[in-house]
Image (cartoon, coloured by chain):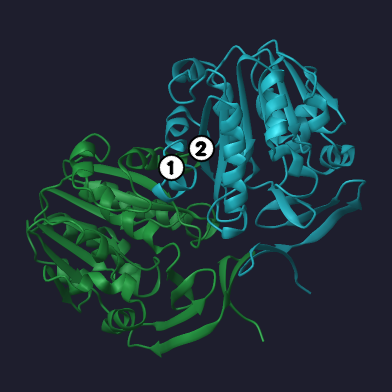
Chain colours: A cyan, B green
Amino acid sequence: MELWFTEQHSKDLRFLIKVTKQVYSVKSDFQNICIFDSEEFGRFLVIDDYLMLTEKDEFIYHEMISHVPISTNLNLKNILVIGGGDGGTVREIVKYSNDMKIDVCEIDSVVVDACKKYLPSVACGFNDKRVKIYFEDGTKFVKNINNKYDLIIIDSTDPFGPGEALFTEEFYYDCFNALTENGILVNQHESVFYSEYIQQMIKVNKNLKNIFPICEIYQAHIPTYPSGHWLFGFASKTIQPTIDFKSEGWNNLDIKTKYYNTNLHIGAFMLPNYVKEKFS
Amino acid sequence: MELWFTEQHSKDLRFLIKVTKQVYSVKSDFQNICIFDSEEFGRFLVIDDYLMLTEKDEFIYHEMISHVPISTNLNLKNILVIGGGDGGTVREIVKYSNDMKIDVCEIDSVVVDACKKYLPSVACGFNDKRVKIYFEDGTKFVKNINNKYDLIIIDSTDPFGPGEALFTEEFYYDCFNALTENGILVNQHESVFYSEYIQQMIKVNKNLKNIFPICEIYQAHIPTYPSGHWLFGFASKTIQPTIDFKSEGWNNLDIKTKYYNTNLHIGAFMLPNYVKEKFS
């Protein structure tokens, strides 16, 4: 028997991973969570039929969503991760020895428990004593917080289902207020190769631009995400991500990464014409 | 009925494109050539079961294999394309108004004829009067040519089957001799995400380094190629691809591109750690 996990990357494109075993499956109050084993990609996490991460390439997404903003301000004191229940983003943040507080606001405790048990190489960062997890709705969590976080990372699922509210202008407005005067917001920004999400992500980008004076987009090669050409949004009050980032300072920290480096940091903001045009 | 073209990107990963119609299928003296229509990707070309190009994203590969080297020397007089029977690379080269000669050495005339008939938006460059096509074996073609070409673009299929000889040290040695004193060689360099070709491409890269004093690798996001993270090799006698390239000069030419731009040119050489390590 052969078992193939199948994701529809667009209506005419299917992406199939050969599964050796289903190791976990549960319906939480918010979503369907499944974990599979495969030879090629190691263990992988699927939420509501969409592949969230694989052990083989999750490092790319998690390094790029965290080290890019952190390298632009090496004196961060308070970081908020919204979503990120798998722990991969936190694992990258705790590589810094700063005396920082890292709050994680994840709506679904079942994701965290499942990843701690079945994906320990991803969830290991949750053990760091600087990390505090709140099992709450991120949109409610940021309301009425003022001038607290130096960095908010929105490590969400796609812009539909439980994650949808994390792409709205109202939410970005609340994040803006929750950020300190040099605050940075980074979010996963989908892909614009397949037509399904293009209009939606153009709108999301406008939502960000309506709130933040600085808005840039950067990219990474993530083989298991649709098109493999994944985008991230970098929004901030004052910090420009390629001018203000501290190349030498970051390199002196000697943080081990498999994808990110300070040259690539610059290159990630150098977008193809067809992507730039979408957000111009 | 549903018809899905299926490519095995690795033994445990399948990539399926929904086909609306098969428009062409022939077995030439060298390979099986098929052309399909699809809604998502437009028309696409398959050789020996491997997807070669789709109308939707072929511009990325063809722009990156041609404009990157040409922008480093805007005075090219003689260009040789080995392979490239679909015409996409030539279409990009003829955007330059230089008084240049463009030789194409393609082993299989059937590919050229099929693309002229069924993929005219790709093959259109063949109509330019500066282009001359030789239907010969590229490895034999370059032997005994001396100091002639300013640029050789190896626009080959994968490193097995008819294309295999185009990845050997002997062939690169002949190309070196066929190049002028500032000559450049560019080749498609596969991907190193899936294990299938990694060792082979490390060897290919060493073959290039054994012959050329300057060898760099650059990357592009090509969604329909395995992993979407495609590499190109840039080898030259004297020209350094990010230092010697003429950003202002190229921009003054006002050449229309959908992927390539002079910022991205620099970014394309900024590789992730895990890719750099493979070729160090």
Q: Which residue is painted at 47% across and 59% down in the image? A: B197
**Residue A58 horizontal side relative to residue B159, left or right:** right
A210 w.r.t. A95: above or below: below
Amino acid type for the residue under numbered disc 2: Tyr
Which badge, 1 or 2, is on the more N-terminal residue? Answer: 2
Residue with the mark numbered 1? A271
Query: Could you give the CA–CA distance between mark 1 and mark 2, rounded to whole angstroms?
Result: 7 Å
Q: Which residue is painted at 60% across and 33% down in the image? A: A208
Q: How many marks can you see?
A: 2
Residue with the mark numbered 2? A218
The quadrant where residue B28 appears: bottom left
- Position of residue B235 measured from the top left corner of the image (x, y, whole percent): 25, 48
Host chain of mark 1? A
The quadrant where residue B20 appears: bottom right
**Residue A75 horizontal side relative to residue B223, left or right:** right
Amino acid type for the residue under numbered disc 1: Leu
Q: Callout 2: 10 Å neighbours few (<14), some, many (20+)?
A: many
Using the image as rendered, state which of residue B247 and residue B133 is in the foreground.
B247
